[in-house]
Amino acid sequence: MVPLTSCHSTISYRPIRPSDIEILEQIHGNIFPIRYESEFFQDVAHGHGIVSWAAVDHSRDDGKGDEPIGFITARVVLATESEILDLLKKDSAESEWSLVYILTLGVVDSYRNLGIASSLILEVIKYASSIPTCRAVYLHVISYNFPAIHLYKKMSFKCIRRLPGFYLIDGQHYDSYLFVYFVKGCQSPCSPMELVTAIMRYVRSGFQSITAKLWSNERKVGWMVQMKGS
């Protein structure tokens, strides 16, 4: 169950607009270690394949009461084209399933710890729940972003997998965690034993691949296999 969140009474949520593009680019640049192209912000602001919400504080006395102080962006994808299809119960309607993928989420420093990020996530969950074919909301979190990891766990997202080297930032690879929130009672088909079996099978395949490479190089190499799931 998603925990209830509290937030400042003067903060409300609305779709991101074309007039928000400049401030949205600034906030993204301050928060994220990667640069987003201008096309991304155009698509967000005009709703081209992306849904979005902005948090605004109407109590501001600087004339910017309708300027975003937080945001969340997401898009609907076909389950068959996603990386979590194996986590969903299979039936004859599989080809019609959809998912909501969270692209970006952020809150400016001075407005953090007010429940704004949680409220933005709830907006996405409500949106996903309104889509008859939607089965889940999912996203990736870089492995060192502990506040985000804690937030999604608090919001009842399940950490399904760890993906080594998922991100490439400034020439360096970083692992990612895959988080999923199942909507409308949809649950992962895996029992605890099935999940352990799947993880062991995943690790075993990686072990065999690495072993083959070691033998082909005809030398001893120190190595470590990390479990790619949780």
Image (cartoon, rainbow, N blue to C red):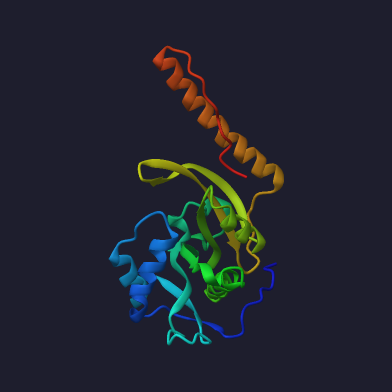
Horizontal arrangement in the rendering, residue 41 relative to residue 164 (left or right): left
Horizontal arrangement in the rendering, residue 78 relative to residue 207 (left or right): left
State whether residue 54 is above or below residue 167: below
Q: Residue at x 61, y 72 (%)?
A: 114
Quarter of the picture containing the N terminus is bottom right
Quadrant in the picture for residue 116 = bottom right
State whether residue 221 is above or below residue 192: above
Q: Nearer the viewer, residue 101 or 171?
A: 171
Q: Nearer the viewer, residue 37 or 31?
A: 31
Q: Confirm whether residue 27 shows in the render.
A: yes
Quadrant in the picture for residue 122 = bottom right
What is the number of callouts on the image? 0
Q: Residue at x 66, y 66 (%)?
A: 185
State whether residue 182 is above or below residue 63: above
Quadrant in the picture for residue 125 = bottom right
Q: Confirm whether residue 133 shows in the render.
A: no
State whether residue 28 is above or below residue 23: above
Q: Nearer the viewer, residue 2 or 143?
A: 143
Give x and y (percent) for residue 140. 50, 54
Residue found at the far front of this picture: 62
Give x and y (percent) for residue 223. 52, 24
Q: Residue at x 45, y 56 (%)?
A: 80
Give x and y (percent) for residue 73. 45, 69
Give x and y (percent) for residue 27. 41, 67
Quarter of the picture containing the C terminus is top right
